[in-house]
Amino acid sequence: MLEFFSKITRHVPSTEFYSDLPFWGYFIAIVIAVRALPPRNSIRTILFLGANVLMLMALPRFSPTALLIYVGLAVFTYALGYLLSGDTVKTKRGRIACAVVGIVAVLFVLAVFKYRLVQELVIKDRSIFGRGAANFIFLIGISYSSFKAIHFIIESYKKSIKDLHFLDFLNYLLFFPSFVSGPINRYNDFYENSARARGSRLRDDFIPGLERIVHGLFKKFVITVILLPHTLVHMKTPVDHLPTWQIFLGLYTYALYFYFDFSGYTDLAIGSARLLGFNLPENFNLPFLKKNIQQLWANWHMSLTGWLTDYVYWPLVRKMRNMEMLRQHPLVISNLAIIITFFLCGAWHGERVNFIVWGLYHGVGIAAVNIYQKWKRRMRHPMVLKYFGSRLSYCVGVVLTFNFFALGLLFFFDAHEVASVLGRLF
């Protein structure tokens, strides 16, 4: 079966999303074809699924095997969602068991294709993956697709999924504009968007979509190109020989590069989806103009932050509230939940210890802000209250928050480089 599908897809042209001219040629053709599709649900859904598959098969690292893995993940997740949404499993214990098994299974797939250690333990024969099979096999898009699948299972358990249709769910999982790096949208929103897209007109979506695409292209291929040579990771002089001011400049530039590169990709994804008639969620809202790290994270990669809040933070808080020793300490509960959430966020970003330390760094930072906010609410001195409401207080907060975020990017370096930079700065 794999050989048969390989023959079908062998001549699909390879391209990188948003960075190659061929991609835009294929994308324009798909926009025209999708807009010309008949409004009948079944025909439109099937043809749109074909467009999603062809675009994913154009990715250099996406193979027929990868597609079959995703289809298998979709079948498993949808079947579990179907069971949980109906009355097949009647007892609460049985429903919880089904949901837990589903979530653990999806996390297992994520771990196998994201973490080298797990893959080496599980996959003994990698020859089915083709050339380079001796190396680590990364399943592109699995980080975001796994979160979509977990969301679907949890919402099915809550019986909040509005309409269950397998082809729509498959389109949701394989939706190519947001497949590689988000934003992470929710199934109900996607299904409602599908209905909207059937009746939408291109002239209503063309200008908003094109504007976002232009913004994204400018960020990714103009601003980031200017910033990259000045980031700490691309400076030719070793860190040990750089003056302190240049180390700070390199870190600040790296933070800006990080923002413009990621938000530029998000603009391209949102704009491309809009041309197809879909509204993806916003992902950034001027995060570097926020006055504390908590507000920054509420406006940075918002679809991920929202997912972590809904499916990690609040379940942890509710669980801890039932513990006798923590019940009377809401601030402790909140801070513990935040630190655990960001620990998991760091682990989700990658298997290196650096990512976990980075997650803990931000979790502890937000916990410190929570403690500060509690102290701040107790203040009654008129001069202090006046300062808290002033523009100076806001500006100081923005500067401190940006510096905190920029210093956190050091944890993306290796341990030796981190030690060198910290030694120079402090």
Image: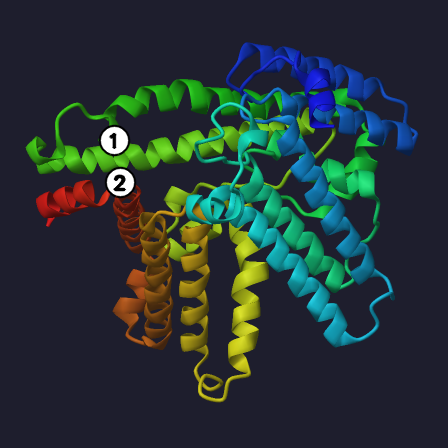
Image disc number at residue 103: none
Sequence-wise, the earlier of marks 1 and 2 is 1
Q: Which residue is mark 2?
A: 413
Q: What x and y, as percent, mark residue 133?
A: 49, 29
Q: How is the image coloured?
A: rainbow
The reply to whether discs 1 and 2 touch (Cβ–Cβ < 8 Å) is: yes
Amino acid found under the numbered disc labelled 2 = Phe
Image quadrant for the N terminus?
top right
Whether residue 231 is visible: no
Disc 2 element? loop
Residue drawn at (74%, 21%) of the image: 4
Q: What x and y, as percent, mark residue 158?
A: 74, 64
Q: What x and y, as percent, mark residue 262?
A: 45, 33
Dot 2, how many residues are within 10 Å of its Cα: few (below 14), some (14-19), or many (20+)?
some
Residue drawn at (61%, 14%) of the image: 24
Amino acid found under the numbered disc labelled 1 = Val
Q: What x and y, as percent, mark residue 76?
A: 73, 49
| Left or right of 239 in this view: 302 | right
Q: Nearer the viewer, residue 332 or 19?
A: 19
Residue drawn at (31%, 56%) of the image: 361
Residue drawn at (27%, 68%) of the image: 384
Disc 1 element? helix
Q: Which residue is mark 1?
A: 233
